[in-house]
Image: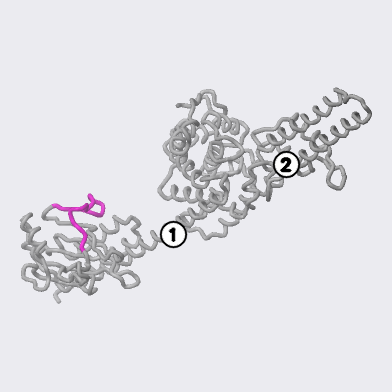
Amino acid sequence: MDKTACDGDITRIRQLNEIGIALSSERDHDALLERIFTSARELTGADAGTLYTVNAEKQQLSFAIVQNDTLNIHLGGLSDPVGDQFPTISLHQADGSPNEHLVVAYTVLNDCTVNIEDAYAAEGFDFSGTRQFDQATGYRSRAFLTVPMHNHEGDVVAVLQLLNKHTADDIDGTFSQADQHIAESLASQAAVAITNQRLIAEMQALFDSFTRVIATAIDAKSAHTGAHCRRVPEATLLLAEATHRSTRPEVVDFHLSDGDRYELKTAAWLHDCGKVVTPHHVMEKSTKLEGLFSRLPMVEARFAAKQQALDAAQLRAELEAYRQSQPFADRERQRFAAQQQQLTDDIAFIRQANTGGEFMHDEDITRLQAIAGKTWQDADGQQQPLLTADELENLCIRRGTLNKNERKIIEGHMTATLDMLNELPFPKHLQRVPEYAGGHHERMNGTGYPKGLTREQLSLPARMMGIADVFEALTAPDRPYKAPMKLSQALTIMGRMVEDNHLDPDLFAVFVEEGVYLDYAREYLADDQFDTVDTASLPGLPATLSV
């Protein structure tokens, strides 16, 4: 071998090594295919060619990249898509026999390289399609080098087909054994890169599906939180994108990369994963007297028994008056009627108090305490309170339906969330998932949970999730203890939470200024929740708000 040829081989080997290193670091699929194909053509001097991908399930080959420098054709990869102008190639004919008359199918079926010097003179293969292409374009397809590409299991995942080698005189040169070896070496490295990329994509798809399965399971566990775990990620990402494009000085340094978006989205999907350990009867507590079962019928039964006792007492009094030949006094009849009416009013009040709500006034609690002080006579003749201490405690809940112990249990889902997420070996690009997911119940003044972190200790994404979580909860249509709020009411409550130093003021300003609430509402809220929002009068907003 002369020195020039030897130097050329050394140069190509060096190029092959450099290409292998570059392929291993490429993350974009289309860019990877383009790099593989362009490198193969450069190393072999090919004027044109095609990169096919194999669909093992359908037993088909698809055109991924088509290039021809002479005809100025560049399709696939990072260029325009191939489209339907190049149909798929079946590996088997209609009768099930192997489609070995096409050279690219032959390469896959027999797992071998095919090097053809002249397609017009070759025997055993059908190049009629090639001749039609040449006739239509004026091109002369001559030399074909077709190389299979294998994955780590030995399956052919793609085919590299090179066409017409450039020579000093023209583009009709044939591919040498050295060209074939270098193409096979590149195909081997490229197949590893494609396989790695495919495995990474499959692992990511599996992980994404896993996070969604957890969220779906939590939503399915509670009919009263509906699609909360699915809606919060949407609200969070809407706010993150709005913050990314905002020009407000307070958030102008916040920027989102694709990796940041994925990390935040993953955290949002997992933000309530700890609810899998929350007892069902606590999570599903839609009324104050609900537990493992509803205790309201027991209360109603006591009132019914007391009413029957009053009816019986009145009948006995009337009978005694009759025996003594005396009229039954009207004042006595009125007294019994007033007692019956009071019982009717009291049980109606208890039913109303049991539903929960945004706030219970002091006079309501005083009335409940007075009712609890009354008694009824049980089957053993013993006097028992109309309301037990536990029933009174629950009915006196000022907001919502959860008592203090139950609220602690619910709040415990955040500790469970952090425990679960901290057990997962998140890769480098997802290291902040526990911090983002674990901070959405923290408050800016440090009175939140589970860690009591302050605004300065929370990242912007964690604070975003807090706003998204509150907004979704206020406007959710599936909470049995309250009607879904209109936009103006929800934003007013959130503004007050900003004033109380619970929600981040800068992000709330972005939430309103960039119309995040409207983008979310158009997708998830009912028509009757839309109303006019006077942003100028909303609490918690700076005077410089621009809407």
Is label 1 or label 2 in front?
2
Which mark is on residue 206? Answer: 1
Which image quadrant is residue 320 in? top right
Q: Kindly identify the residue that appears in the image at 79 percent across and 43 percent down.
A: 388
* Magenta region: 72-89
Q: Which residue is mark 2?
A: 394
Q: Kindly identify the residue that appears in the image at 23 percent across and 63 percent down.
A: 61
Q: Relative to the observer, which residue lies in front, 141 or 378? A: 378
- The three-letter amino acid code for the residue at tag 2 is Asn
Q: Position of residue 63 (x, y in %)?
A: 22, 59
Q: Kindly identify the residue that appears in the image at 63 percent across and 51 percent down.
A: 280
Q: CA distance from mark 1 to mark 2?
A: 44 Å
- The three-letter amino acid code for the residue at tag 1 is Leu
Number of dots carrying numbers: 2
- Per the image, label 1 sits on a secondary structure element best described as helix
Q: Position of residue 495 (x, y in %)?
A: 57, 31
